[in-house]
Amino acid sequence: MSALTFDRLGKAYGETDVVKDVSLTIGEGEFVSLLGPSGCGKTTILRMISGFISPSEGKISIGGQDMRGIRPNQRPTALIFQNLALFPLMPVWENIAFGLEVRGIDKKERRTKAEELLRLVDLPGAADKSIAQLSGGQKQRVAIARALAVEPKVMLLDEPLSALDLKLRQHMRAELRAIQKRTNVTFVYITHDQGEALAMSDRVGVMSNGKLQQVAVPQEIYNKPANGFVASFVGENNIFSGKIGSVSGNAAQFETSIGTFKATVGPNAERAANAKLYVRPEHARLVSQRVNGENAIPVEVADVAFEGNFISIQARDPGGRILVSEARNDGQASVPSPGEKLLMVFDPERAVILADDTPMGAAASA
């Protein structure tokens, strides 16, 4: 059964379309992230779900019920803001129980429910603490518990981890996912951070210019992007401009200024007005001699950067443009020196030609 449905959803301000023709069904207990750059329309969708703004066209249904005319406080949703909006003068348990108090629940029952939720978010014994006594991660848990107190069908989260430092953000990803699985509440998560979206979500919807470009499981979003925008926004790429030559099945020749490469044809690429070739840095290797069937570009190593779990190598192609290769830091990687002349090679199966109607910057463009 679907928890949330968008049917040809749109929002315009005057002549400007902020959200355009978005249709999506989200199942009960599903964790879906809407991912995209600032201004792509994802937060506008969140506000339409919660009822703070009304769609210009289309409709939103929650649990099969049309939300048109339903006020925010009457919707089965809970919203966690980026700034959390906790009440500093209330103890933790009263923060959590605030929504229950508004609904007329008596104090004893509110306290019992708050302590139950504190155990759920792994904060037992924190009921009487002040908000000022909590760490950033603990405040996040209190905000989640407060949202869960009103027993929403759909939890809406607007970049709630963006103010945390990297280590805590990574920890809270796992915590948030675990809480969602324990409660089985449907989560709709808004973010511009691809790492958050890929790590936590059952499915990811990538947005650009008010439209959903692709909705799929994280592995498919990364490994089988629908177009150039998705490939560029989710992860890094070496991008080659050119044109499609001969095509045989899902394989094609792609002609560029630095050579012709064998590649795989992506969705709708043959019919696109513009198409480009995309090769992820982890799929590009630097070698002294190519193997039959591999694409190869002569390069000169420009810089080597140690990134911890991998090594990023920048190399200059014959046209002077920078291409990027990544090697795992597994103790066996051969790391070249700046100035060394090598070949950058990549398999045709790892090079994909994609429609490039909404281009974005990435690791390199040739």
Image (tube, rainbow, N blue to C red):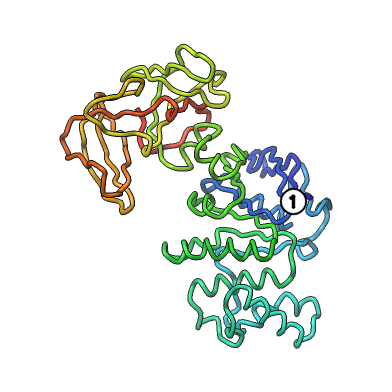
Q: Quadrant of the C terminus?
A: top left
From the top left corner, tell me how far across and down residue 311 is, in percent: 29, 46
Is 119 situated left or right of 282 in this image?
right
Q: Nearer the viewer, residue 247 or 275?
A: 247
* Residue type highlighted by circle 1: Leu
Is 285 situated left or right of 30 in this image?
left
Count of marks overlaid on the render: 1
Residue at 33% x, 18% y is 257
Residue 94, picture quadrant:
bottom right
Is 199 situated left or right of 309 in this image?
right
Q: Nearer the viewer, residue 241 or 224?
A: 224
Is 30 situated left or right of 174 in this image?
right
Residue projecting furthest to the top: 246
From the top left corner, tell me how far across and down residue 305 is, in percent: 25, 47
- Helix or strand or loop: what does disc 1 sit on? strand
Residue at 45% x, 66% y is 168
The 10 Å Cα crowd at callout 1, few under 14, some 14 to 19, many 20 or more, is: many
Residue at 79% x, 60% y is 71
From the top left corner, tell me how far across and down residue 38 is, in percent: 52, 48
Q: Is residue 43 above or below residue 143?
A: above
From the top left corner, tell me how far across and down residue 267 is, in percent: 57, 26
Residue at 42% x, 24% y is 348
Residue on which disc 1 sits:
4
